[in-house]
Image (cartoon, rainbow, N blue to C red):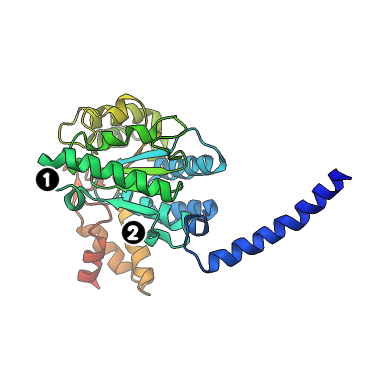
């Protein structure tokens, strides 16, 4: 008898809860209401709008999907993006916010830190550590699914991000806060080792899609760790292997630049302007001098170039 009643209760209780949850979310912008991940749309966005980045596309889509499928992860997801300017690092970090939260990057649970804005004075690093620890702890208390994006890590005071170490490890609770469902993204340049591998690959006549993560992962970590101007310089986050994955963004060739141009022209209603596509692609600076394989600015300078040639 109790079994039957329990089953009936579940059938009645579940839809009632769903109705109350939906009603609650019409008047609330709480974390639970705003968090609405759409992994399929994230994957579609990555593969449609990020050019020349097979490694980043695969890693981000797979790691995020795996992390969100685990209802009780033992540690947060920590991704570190590395690559030259204009290769898509900031774009991909924005895609994460856009497809995890209903209010996208404007969500109060997506937090962005820029060192020149939030941590501009190196001699105040100890004060910044206290503030950063408090910010992260406070936001995790409010929303366990918080997303933290740290841009321009090459300008971050060394040692500052080490204050995050207690939040990134495998412990269940820190400072009374469950932090294991959060996502952290670090964005750096540090493209030297990535561009070197890409150039050697190109000179050997191999397709860029043949480049594997195993060729770059450890080299990126060591380069960041040993770079005295990096926010990761001798960082305990690298020492303790608290970063889930170092994500390489490869330098872009002319065909990738022209795809960027075509995409932006279509957004402006000028899809048919092949002349502009060719003009912008030909007007970029490519390196190295013998070969001119890769754009020095990626897609970053594309909007200005389009305005010039339209």
Q: Residues within 10 Å of mark 1 (few under 14, many from 20)?
A: few
Quarter of the figure with the N terminus: top right
Which quadrant of the structure image shows residue 157? top left
Q: Are marks 1 and 2 in contact (CB under 8 Å)?
A: no
Q: Position of residue 36 (x, y in %)?
A: 52, 56
**Rendered residue at 39%/52% (across/down):** 50
- Read off the residue under disc 2: 260
Residue 28 percent coordinates (x, y): 49, 65
- Using residue 220 as the reference point, say whether residue 146 is left or right of it: right
Residue 266 visible in this rendered orientation of the protein: yes
Q: Residue drawn 40% across and 46% down? A: 140
**Helix, strand or loop for disc 1:** loop
The answer to whether 101 is drawn above or below residue 76 in the figure is below
* Element marked by disc 2: helix
Single out the residue that lies furthest toward the right. 1
Question: Would you say residue 243 is visible in this rendering?
Answer: no
Residue 287: give x, y in percent of width and height.
19, 44
In this rendering, would 125 be left or right of 68? left
Residue situated in front as seen by the camera: 199 or 2: 2
**Which residue matches tag 1?**
121
Q: x%, y% of residue 134? A: 30, 44
Nearer the observer, 174 or 253: 174
Q: Earlier in the sequence, mark 1 or mark 2?
A: 1
Residue at mark 1 to residue at mark 2: CA–CA distance: 36 Å
Q: Is residue 115 rendered to the left or right of residue 262?
A: left
| Residue at the limit of the structure toward the top, as seen here | 239
Residue occupying the point 77% across, 55% down: 11
């Amino acid at each position: 008898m109790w079994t039957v009643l329990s089953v009936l209760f579940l059938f009645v209780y579940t839809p009632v809860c769903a109705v109350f949850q939906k009603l609650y979310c019409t008047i609330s912008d709480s974390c639970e209401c705003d968090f609405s991940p759409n992994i399929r749309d994230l994957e579609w966005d990555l593969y449609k709008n990020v050019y020349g980045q097979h490694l980043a596309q695969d890693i981000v889509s797979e790691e995020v999907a795996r992390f969100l499928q685990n209802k009780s992860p033992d540690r947060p997801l920590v991704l570190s993006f590395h690559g030259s300017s204009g290769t898509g690092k900031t774009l991909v970090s924005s895609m994460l916010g856009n497809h995890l939260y209903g209010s996208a990057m404007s969500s109060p649970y997506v937090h962005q830190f820029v060192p020149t804005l939030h941590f501009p004075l190196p001699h105040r690093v100890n004060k910044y550590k206290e503030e950063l620890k408090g910010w992260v702890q406070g936001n995790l208390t409010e929303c366990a699914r918080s997303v933290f994006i740290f841009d321009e890590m090459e300008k971050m005071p060394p040692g500052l991000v080490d204050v995050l170490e207690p939040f990134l490890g495998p412990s269940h609770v820190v400072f009374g806060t469950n932090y294991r469902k959060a996502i952290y993204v670090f964005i750096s340049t540090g493209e030297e080792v990535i561009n070197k591998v890409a150039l050697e690959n190109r000179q050997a006549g191999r397709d860029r899609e043949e480049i594997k993560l195993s060729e770059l992962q450890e080299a990126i970590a060591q380069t960041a760790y040993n770079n005295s101007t990096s926010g990761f310089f001798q960082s305990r986050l690298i020492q303790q292997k608290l970063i889930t994955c170092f994500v390489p963004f490869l330098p872009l060739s002319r065909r990738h630049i022209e795809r960027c141009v075509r995409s932006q022209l279509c957004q402006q209603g000028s899809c048919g302007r092949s002349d502009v596509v060719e003009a912008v692609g030909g007007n970029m600076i490519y390196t190295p001098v013998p070969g001119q394989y890769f754009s020095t600015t990626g897609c970053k300078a594309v909007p200005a170039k389009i305005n010039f040639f339209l």
